[in-house]
Image (cartoon, rainbow, N blue to C red):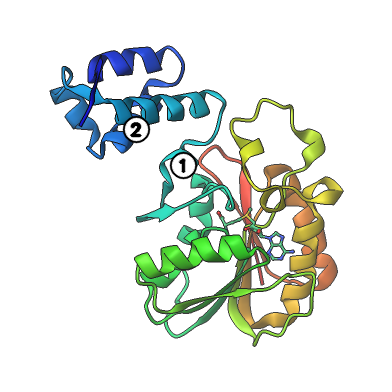
Amino acid sequence: MKYSKINISEAINIANLKIDAFDTELLLSFVKKVNRSYLYTHQNELLTTDEKTYFFELVQERELKKPLAYLIGKKGFWKNNFYVNPSVLVPRPESEIIVEKILEYDLEGKDLLELGIGSGIISISLGLENKNLSVIGTDSSIDALMVANTNSKKLKAKNVIFLKHDWNNKWLFPKMDFIVSNPPYVDKEKLIGDEDGIWFEPEKALFAEDEGMTDLKTIIFKSINFLKDNGRLFLEHAPDQAKKVIGEAKKVGFKKIEQINDYNGLTRVSILG
Ligand SMILES: C[S@@+](CC[C@H](N)C(=O)[O-])C[C@H]1O[C@@H](n2cnc3c(N)ncnc32)[C@H](O)[C@@H]1O
């Protein structure tokens, strides 16, 4: 093994001039396959030439704002780490609100459909929380389905199946107790350009026409016919779409409407029944 002339402490100091100190530590521990505390206890250890090259390549990509999750190939969500790559949205902590809310319902023996699974975080987290919940997750992206299947296998979510389906096409699902979706809802026009990392994520996972409402409208419109009596549709959306979601829900005949705020007091989730 060839060693470079640079030790852990020096590598950290150089990287910290370019990127956030926390990101530096995560990237270096990822490259060295050690935990972060190892970096503190082995500050004088030399990096091998391969480690040095790989680490500074990753630092450069991070400096260009590539999401950390894509660089290290994983992101924590709910109770697990999920494999991610640039074909799926980077899981957002605010999507845990939807998981938390669904878990307040009795899921025993129930049927749940997720529309737009991405890496599978919501379907898999719910499937693992209740082994007697049957979960069907769909996405129009084959690449996303491959990522979600990798996660499902790794985490042994045996009650979760994933299917390729585009919600703009015909729906052939049985009626469900729960339908959940975090669809694309970002309004491209409203972006100011310095959003961290967003341009590395798949456009089809993020953006929707009509001020971000197109996919939300389609899902609200179609879901009402695929819910059992007392079934519920859970939707994540942007805070400024909350009123419009209520309008669309009433228009198609939803009677029960509840909205949930995030920890900053912004309305992020609507529950329609
Ligand atoms: C905002 S991402 C959410 C991913 C994941 N559920 C999460 O919370 O991280 C939306 C997902 O919807 C999928 N999608 C976009 N348009 C779709 C469509 N017409 N039919 C089915 N899935 C679609 C995208 O491929 C993407 O994976």
**Horizontal relation, residue 63 to residue 159: left or right:** right
Which corner quadrant holds the C terminus?
A: bottom right
* Separation of residues labelled 2 and 1 (CA atoms): 10 Å
Q: Residue furthest left?
A: 41
**Horizontal relation, residue 142 to residue 53: left or right:** right
Residue at horizontal 33%, vertical 25%? 52
Q: Residue furthest front?
A: 2
- Which residue is label 1 attached to? 69
Secondary element at image label 1: helix
**Residue situated in front as seen by the camera: 149 or 237:** 149
Residue 160 location in percent, x, y?
A: 47, 76
Secondary element at image label 2: helix
Q: Quadrant of residue 24?
A: top left
Specify whether tag 2 is near ligand 1 (CB below 8 Å): no
- Which residue is label 2 attached to? 26
Above or below, comparing residue 120 to residue 96 in the picture:
below
Q: Tell me, yes or no, if residue 103 can be seen here.
A: no
Q: Amino acid at mark 2?
A: Leu
Above or below, comparing residue 119 to residue 94 in the picture:
below
Residue 205 location in percent, x, y?
A: 67, 52
